[in-house]
Image (tube, rainbow, N blue to C red):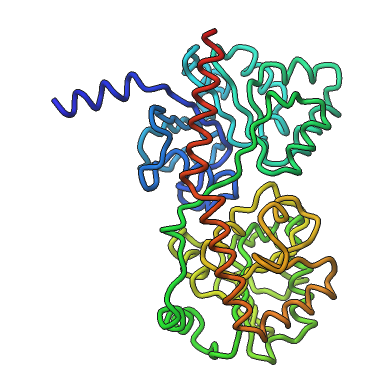
Amino acid sequence: MQQQNKNNQQQNSHKVLHVIEYFPGFVGYTGGGAERLLERLITAQGNSSPKGYRPLLYVANKKERDNHCGYPFVTVEDPERIKLEMSIQKHNHPDRILHFGNTFLIHRHPERFRKIVQNWKGPIIQRVTLSSRVADLFVMHQDQTTEYLSRIDAFISQSDQMTKELLNLGISAKKITQIENGIDCETKKPLSWKDKVALRKKLIPDVTPKGALFLFVGRLGDPTKKVDELLETWRSGRFAEMGHHLVLAGNYDKLNLHASGFANKAGVRDESNVIFTGHLKEQGLDMYFQAADVYVSASEREGFSNSVLEAMSYALQVLVRKGVSGYEHLIVPGKTGLLFRSPTELSKKILYLASSPLLRKKLGASARAHVIKNYSIEQMVEKYRQLYSSLLVTSRN
C-alpha cells in the first residue's frame, strides 16, 4: 500500500524537465557551477528537492551515452540516436515545466533552441549562467530575437549585476527572477583545527604549521579563469621559499603546460610548491577545501561562483578579483573576503593573508556565517518551488 501511494504521488506531482549539456554525477566530469547547482537541486540532497515536483533530466552531450546515473528520477538519453528537439518534445505537456539549466542552446544551437521553445506546451525557464550568452543571441539574430525569447516565461538571474544586464537587453522585469545558488552548509563545513592539521599532513606531507595552503578550483584550461596569471604571480612572489603551497584542483588537459611548467600528470608539484591535482571527485575536492586556508582566484568572469560559495561555507578566507559580478555579489570586502585589482595587489594580499592566521580565521568564520544566513540550499530550493508554482498557475489562467 505504501509503495502504491508513493507511485501515485510521483504520478500526480508536477514534472520539471531539466536540460543541460553536462552533468557532474557522470564519470569523468566534475562540472562547473551550473551543473553542480543542478545536481543539488534535482538529487534531493538532504531531502531538499522542491516538494511536489518530480525532476527529469536530459543531458545533451554525447559523451554521457555510456554512463549510468544512479540518481532518482533522472532520464538520460542518447542524442546520437534521437535528435535533441525530438527527445525533449517526447516529454511535452501543458503541466510540465521545461527548465534550461544553462545557456548552451542559446549560445551554440539557436535554431534548435527556437524549434524547442516554439513547440513546447508548458512554461519555460531559462537559467542565465552568463548574460553575454543572451546578448550574443541579440547580435547574431537581431530580426528573430524577440521571437526566440518571447516564449520564455522566466529568466533566472544569479546576481544583482546580472539582473541589470538582462534589463539592459530589454527583457521585462516581470520575466526576471533572481535566485542565487545555494549550498548545504551542514555538509560543507570546516574541520576542527586538529583534524585539519592531520588532513593537511595526509594530502601534503611536507607542509609546516606556519605554511599557508592556498586553493583554486575550476577549469584550468578556460582562459577566463586566468590560471596562468595566478601562477606567474605566485612564482614571482617566491611564496614557496616561505613554506606556502598553492593547490590547483581541476582538469588541465587544455592548459598550456609548457608555458606553465607542468608535466602532464596529476599530483605533480613544481619547485614553487604548486600542486596540480587533476580530476577530483567530490569527496576528494571536499578534502582540499577542508585542508586549505585561503581560496584564491584570478578569474575575470563568473556568473555565480559555486567554488567561492563552497569555500566560504568551509570557513575559508577568499581572495578574488574586483569587478567580477559573480564574486562581488558574495564578497563583503574586509568582512567575508578580500578583492584585488592587479597582479601586484594580488601578490601583496597573498603575502598579507599567508602571514596573518588570526585574520584568516576571523574572516573565514564571518564568511561561513554570511553563507548560512543568505545562501542556504533550503532558501534556494524554496525560491525554485515558488517560481515553478507561479508559472503553472499563470499558464492555467
Q: Is residue 13 left or right of residue 292?
A: left
- Which residue is drawn at the image coordinates 79% and 31% (left, top)? 167
Question: Where does the N terminus fall, quadrant-wise?
Answer: top left
Q: Quadrant of the C terminus?
A: top right
Q: Is residue 213 visible?
A: yes
- 124 to 211, vertically: above or below: above
Q: Is residue 334 above or below residue 72?
A: below
In the rendered image of this protein, does residue 159 appear above or below residue 320? above
- Left or right of 192? Residue 347 is right
The answer to which of 187 and 98 lies nearer the viewer is 187
Q: Residue furthest left?
A: 1
> In which quadrant of the rendered view does residue 170 lie?
top right
Query: Which residue does the image show at 59% across and 53% down from the upper left?
Result: 306
**Percent of width and height locating residue 121:** 55, 11
The image quarter containing residue 264 is bottom right
Q: 176 or 365, which is in the foreground?
A: 365
Looking at the picture, does residue 228 appear above or below residue 161? below
Residue 128 percent location from the top left of the image: 67, 36
Q: Residue at x 59, y 50 (%)?
A: 32
Instruction: Identify which residue is drawn at 43% across, 62% down.
Output: 283
Q: Is residue 279 visible?
A: no
**Residue 169, position as x, y percentages in the image:** 82, 30
| Residue 217: image location, x then y, percent | 61, 62
